[in-house]
Image: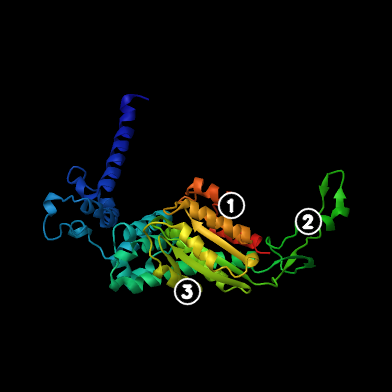
Amino acid sequence: MTAADAAPSGRADDHEAARRWRLVLGRYAGDTLPVAPQDQRLDRTLGHLYDREYTARGHRHGRDDGPRAGRGGGRDGSVVAGLDWLGSARELFPRDTFERMQVEAVGRYGMTELLADPRAVDAVEPSPELASALLRARGRLGPDVQDGLRRLVARVVEDVVRRLRPRFVTAVDGRRDRARRSSARSSRTFDSAATVRANLGRWDPDRRRLLVTDLRFSARRRRALSYDVVLLVDQSGSMASSVLYSAVSAGILAGLPGITVRLVLFDTSVVDLSHLAHDPVSVLLTAQLGGGTDIARAVQYAEQHVRDPRRTVVALVSDFEEGGSVSQLVAAVGRLHASGVRLLGLAALDGQANPAYDRGVARRLAEQGMEVAALTPERFAEWLGEVLP
């Protein structure tokens, strides 16, 4: 191939690079990188959201320093209503990109018009990430968007409950009864040991395989004794996602027989929301995210409310970034463990589900008898089911 042959490809690559840079830079690219005709709608949709970044940083576009300057929009042709913006963004971008743009719209750029318009609230794609962003921004939201905020948080909670409740019901609401066979066949009730025993006579020595024709499933029986589950939930600013899932978990547990839930949110103070444990939406709209962290105070509060240590589980949901006294925290955990309370430490996960917590403090708590793990909400349900006798 000659240089002449390669030139068109090079020009095409340069053109595509210029096109992408124009979309990245937005209207501040000026006339240097004019937007292509086919990208007009894409440019308007991106500009409606991301041109706000320039305003937030104090930049102003010379030719637009008129009445609209400083409001975060673009030129007149770039202004679209919140509902129209949602429709365009959903149509133009993949779902994961669209969901990320929603989160940035309400959490980073304050597009409260999405919450003020009931039609826009219905058009928003609910996600835990979006709810977490709303909870972090709640203190900056005016009274005119509170109804929209509640409706949107309720939609997210409904989706999370739909996903998590079967896990909790299966894991927590009773134990396997291997003496009684079940007609309910699922991966949750499959009894591998009983299946192997029932099919031992069907061993094929030539193929060295067990021919399984009789599958066994175990039933589940409800526990005879009641148990107290105390959820201590860190509500510092980085814990929005954990607060969401903890509130939902408490709501599910509160509806299960034989389980009494005490739900406690804490930062440097302790707030007992047990009376709202059955209503995750109210819990989330009551939570005050932000501030410092005093885990020791929360654990000491739980210590004062243990009725029967042998039938109590204390689950601490935190990043273990103790802002109070670590020695008092360690001592309180040691006392609870010595009394017979079962202690679980659910470490925080970051946005990519990677553990994000103070391992030094977690290790000291583990040495005092707390079982510490970084788990997804689904796995937490199974863990709790294993802990409750």
Could you say where residue 250 lies in the image, as x and y percent from the top left?
Answer: 53, 68
Between the residue at mark 2 and the residue at mark 3, the CA separation in whole angstroms equals: 42 Å
Which residue is found at the position 39% from the left and 72% from the top? 151
Q: Quadrant of the C terminus?
A: bottom right
- How many marks overall? 3
- In the picture, the disc for residue 368 is 1
For marks 3 and 1 on the same chain, the one whose residue lies earlier in the sequence? 3
Res 83 → quadrant: bottom left
Q: Nearer the viewer, residue 77 or 162?
A: 162
Does 34 sit left or right of 206 as displayed?
A: left
Give the crowd class for mark 2: few <14, some 14-19, many >=20 residues within 10 Å: few
Q: Secondary structure at mark 2?
A: helix
User: Which of the labelled discs sits on residue 193, or is there none?
Assistant: 2
Proximity of marks 3 and 1: CB atoms separated by less than 8 Å: no
Task: Please report whichever mark, 2 or 3, sits nearer to the chain's N-terminal start.
Answer: 2
User: Quarter of the image containing the N terminus?
Assistant: top left
Residue at 49% from the left image edge and 65% from the top image edge: 301
Residue 183: percent from the left, percent from the top? 75, 69
Per the model, the C-alpha gap separating discs 3 and 1 is: 31 Å
Q: Nearer the viewer, mark 2 or mark 3?
A: 3
Of the pair 108 and 204, the residue shown nearer to us: 108
Question: In this image, 115 relative to 345: left or right?
Answer: left
How does the figure colour the protein chain or chains? rainbow
Residue under numbered circle 3 = 276
